[in-house]
Amino acid sequence: MRPTLKQCSMFVFAAVAAMSVQAQTVIENANGYTLNKEGELVQFTALAFDAQGKILAVGSAADVSAKAPGARRVDMGGKTLLPGLIDAHGHVFGLGQMLTQLDLSQTTSLEGALKAIADYSRANAGQGWLRGRGWNQENWKLGRFPTAADADTVVSDRPVWFERVDGHAGWANSRALAAAGITDKTPDPAGGKIVRDANGKATGVLVDAAQELVTKVLPAQTEAEGRVVLDRALGALAKVGVTSTHDAGLGVAEDRLYRAYADQGKLTARIYGMIGGTEGDFDALAKNGPLKTYGNDMYALRAVKLYSDGALGSRGAALIKPYSDEPHSHGLLFHKTAQMDAMMKKAMARGYQVNVHAIGDAGNHQILDIYQKELAATKSAAQRHRIEHAQVVTQADIVRFKTLGIIPSMQPTHATSDKNMAETRVGHERIKGAYAWRSFLHQGSRIACGSDFPVESPNPFFGIHAAVTRQDASGQPIAGWYPNQAMSLKEAFRCFTLDAAYAGHAENSLGSLEPGKWADFIVVDQDLFKMPTYDIYKTGVLQTWVGGKQVYQK
């Protein structure tokens, strides 16, 4: 006998109900930690989420099970479970490129770097340009920048281009200089510097805006190459427990790939995008205003990234008084104040959060002055404007971050990487306002923490370790580098979770494990809150979940 229409309807309803129940998941037997709305650290043993990946309940096994009867169960075996960590400042495609090019970050001498270049050249004999990143003359104890002549000794038959670790200088050989049309008579561009020797000869290193002389003649990346780069970067982020990152400077091509990946379910980390600059790409991408969410909160494009100055290591950061170790140099402000003001105002008026790179005290002062003027004119305080790095700041300007409501977006591992040269650059007095996390926290500023990958490792546990100990991985210095500026463990955890989420307008959906938020979480091999702080950097990620889907398993 055929079933009636009413019976069919009942069967369908029962099947849908069963699917709904089975689609729920309970994570149990976990050693869980999260922050609550008040910023207090709370523990739990279980959490449940629905088919869409939204959290239903967090708490004891009994309480959670009662709210998700019949759900599939995943036993964590007592492992420590944390909210997914958020990197508030990274360069996703830069990370992917480093993973597909020559990585010079571990070289400890010029000789070692040249050997690595020679080996890479032999292994890539059919390649045109040879590219890489990560060199740092400070680690080489060289006392100078490398030169084109140095590079020519190992590769002279084709152009090479290697970015410094901070991305604010590049090293070319003679072939690359010729391809870019750079001669001894080429003038320094605005906001950039062609490094020259005592005789005025271009040495092969280009600082800040001068790098564009070379980068504009590099072969354009194809979409297929872009996909490979993005895949590598996403894999690296999942492996270290980064479930969301703020991509500091992207254009039309990157936006197109992010949307495609979100549509295809291939994004394994949430991307909060910053448009690079306010010119061509901005005009194209901003036609419909800020993109607040796309693809179940996997992608957003509601910020703009601008640059005030360069970096400390290449002496491009703009200082109010000269460098202590180079008295004739103040570094570089990239733009005159009127020009920077116009760019910031344009983005603010269009509804975008403005995030400006400022490392030196002169760069930070310039941007704070403009914020003070334009916040009132544009009435855009709710856009949560930021200064990226806020690395060397006068005591008076630190206070202005709070009074103006500007978020300091800072990278803890910069302090432990820069400690070998920072005080040499700025002297004993100015260092008091450098990497000054405690000064910002004491006045009530929310710090959004990140790594600035690939300048630093994307591993957030390196950042938490640096924030708490002010030490490098070898435990130096023993008492910590200016330990009075250290964070507590809870503060460091918060700046990689809730406060990083706040800096991306996502505190209601990310940053903690609470009902209604996305089930973005990680499982790690040690109890972060019980282990010795000096070992935090050793924490390993066992699993990474984004929106209730596992995207990494060790």
Image: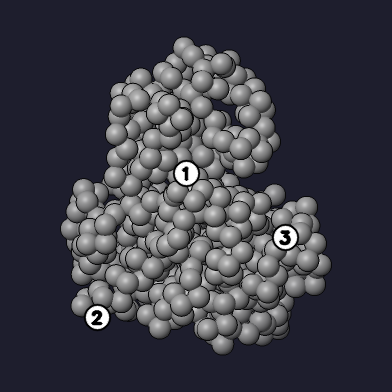
**What kind of colouring is applied to the model shown?**
one colour
Mark 1 crowdedness (10 Å alpha carbons): few <14, some 14-19, many ≥20:
many
Q: Earlier in the sequence, mark 2 or mark 3?
A: 2
Which residue corresponds to the image point at 78% horizontal and 66% vertical from the top-left?
479
Q: Position of residue 280 (x, y in %)?
A: 21, 48
Q: Which mark is residue 89?
A: none
Tell whether label 3 touches label 2 (CB within 8 Å). no
Q: Earlier in the sequence, mark 2 or mark 1?
A: 1
Residue that numbered label 2 is attached to: 376
- Is residue 489 something that shows in the picture? yes
What separation in Å lies between label 2 and label 1 (alpha carbons)?
34 Å
Residue that numbered label 1 is attached to: 167
Q: Position of residue 450 (x, y in %)?
A: 54, 61
Which residue corresponds to the image point at 45% horizontal and 60% vertical from the top-left?
321
Residue that numbered label 3 is attached to: 471
Tell whether label 1 touches label 2 (CB within 8 Å). no
**Could you tell whether 21 is left or right of 534 in the image?**
left
Q: Amino acid at mark 2?
A: Ala
Q: Amino acid at mark 3?
A: Gln
Q: Amino acid at mark 1?
A: Gly
Q: Residue furthest bottom?
A: 38
Q: How many marks do you count on the picture?
A: 3
Q: Which picture quadrant has residue 207? A: top left
Query: SS of the residue at dot 2?
Result: helix
Q: Which picture quadrant has residue 192? A: top left
Quadrant of the image containing the N terminus:
bottom left
